[in-house]
Amino acid sequence: MDNAFAQTAAAEPTIDTGDTAWMLISCALVLLMTPGLAFFYGGLVRSRNVLNTMMMSLIMMGLVGVTWVLWGYSLAFAPTELNPGSEPAFAANPIIGSLKWIFLNGVSFDQPDPVGYAPTIPHQVFMLYQMMFAIITPALISGAIVERMTFKAYFWFVLLWSSFVYSPLAHWVWGKGWLLTLGALDFAGGTVVHISSGVSAVVAAWLLGPRLNYPNQPSPPHNVTYVLLGIGLLWFGWLGFNGGSALGAGGLATVAIVATVVSSAAAGLTWVLLEWILRGKPTALGIATGFLAGLVGITPAAGFVTPIAAILIGSITSVGCFYAVSLRVKLQFDDSLDAFPVHGFGGTIGAILTGLFATKEVNSFGANGLFYGDFALLWKQIVGVVATYIFAAAATFLILKVLGAFMPLRTKSTIEEQGLDIHEHGEEAYGQDLI
């Protein structure tokens, strides 16, 4: 997914069956993360809203699975010009891709992409892998606005958001856009996935307002076992999320997977120790959140850092997210499932720490961070973070304001009180409310 990988150095693009097999497996792994997120978020809400919450993730598999083929992939990755045999062979708009590959026109099933994103796998495999990221990213936003946004408004919001926020950001970082040209590093989605969704989530929560009776009425998780199942599926899928971003089976994929595992392990351990020391008891919900924080934090750095650096990144991100969640509770801001404190803030920490710990000893196509003698990368990472914050926040605000002029964004108070499952979907998860 990142352009700082060994495959870009290949002189003559040829299909490698090993790389192709790994990338097809990675597609399956990353796709599994969306149902995993559905369980993670679904367990955290009240029982009368569990189906609606899970649907907010699952609908992405249908909606983005279609729009990515029709126009999303082209807007994210298609070159502005493509003239085989001439120099340069392509030109990339710094802001957004062209419509050259709309409806997958010219996207081959048996030849690599002509731009050189992934020269050892078929173009359609690369497209499919990128689709999995496009599916899960808007689903992350739902964590901030569960139990109160109408499903109709959410449907149209994520349709517009995935087209006009996600695709341009993917182009900036991975589609030869301006952040890649600048030299900012984002191996698997710290800015594109986590910061963009986290910032958008907090804007959406602010515009919608808090849930009915929040914070006076407690809203405890109705099924922590769902949360634990969800984090297991997420961690399993994340091996393809980060490992597949090497775009081939080899040393770089190994680096990314090792970093992913040890970062998440360190983050979960750190969170548990913080709870044990500061609050007296280690919780299952805490270790799950810690694991997730570590996965988020290592995502931008996974292909650029050593295992020891990955442990530090996981632990530091866990501490940061732990106190960000605590601050959100203290401020009584209803980001219902902590989408920003974990994804937005965790992605921010990870992106900045990439500017400290990245080393060309691990990935010669990356860059050296501050701890390896180069301050420039840290500055580039900060620019990427700030740009993502500004763009995601402004675009989300605009999309929701426009939608709000055509339809109500949140449910009526009576529906919210009774639960969204029966009113939005005509179903009940358990046949009756448990709480």
Image (tube, rainbow, N blue to C red):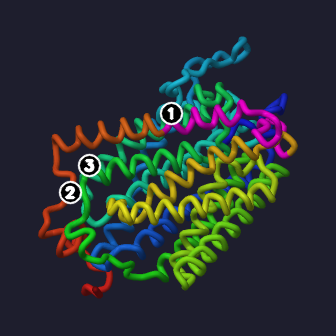
Q: Is residue 256 left or right of residue 194?
A: right
- In the rendered structure, find residue 252 and report the number of the disc placed on it: none
The residue type indicated by label 1 comes to: Ala
Please tell me which of labels 3 and 1 falls first in the chain: 3
Position in image of residue 155 (x %, y %): 31, 52
The residue lying furthest to the right in this view is 361
Pointer 2: what residue?
Answer: 410
Q: Is residue 183 left or right of residue 75?
A: right
Please tell me which of labels 1 and 2 falls first in the chain: 1
Whether pointer 3 and pointer 1 mark residues with C-beta atoms closer than 8 Å, the reply is no
Residue under the point 65% across and 66% down: 267
Of labels 1 and 2, the one closer to you: 1
Q: Which residues are magenta?
A: 362-388
Position in image of residue 216 (x %, y %): 24, 73
Describe the element under mark 3 as helix, strand or loop: helix
Position in image of residue 327 (x %, y %): 43, 61
Task: Quarter of the image for the C terminus: give it.
Answer: bottom left
Crowding at label 1, few (<14), some or many (≥20) Cα neighbours within 10 Å? some
The residue type indicated by label 3 comes to: Leu
Q: Is residue 122 left or right of residue 212?
A: right
- In the rendered structure, find residue 207 and report the number of the disc placed on it: 3
Position in image of residue 251 (x %, y %): 85, 51
The image quadrant of residue 176 is top right
Marks 3 and 2, how far apart at CA: 10 Å
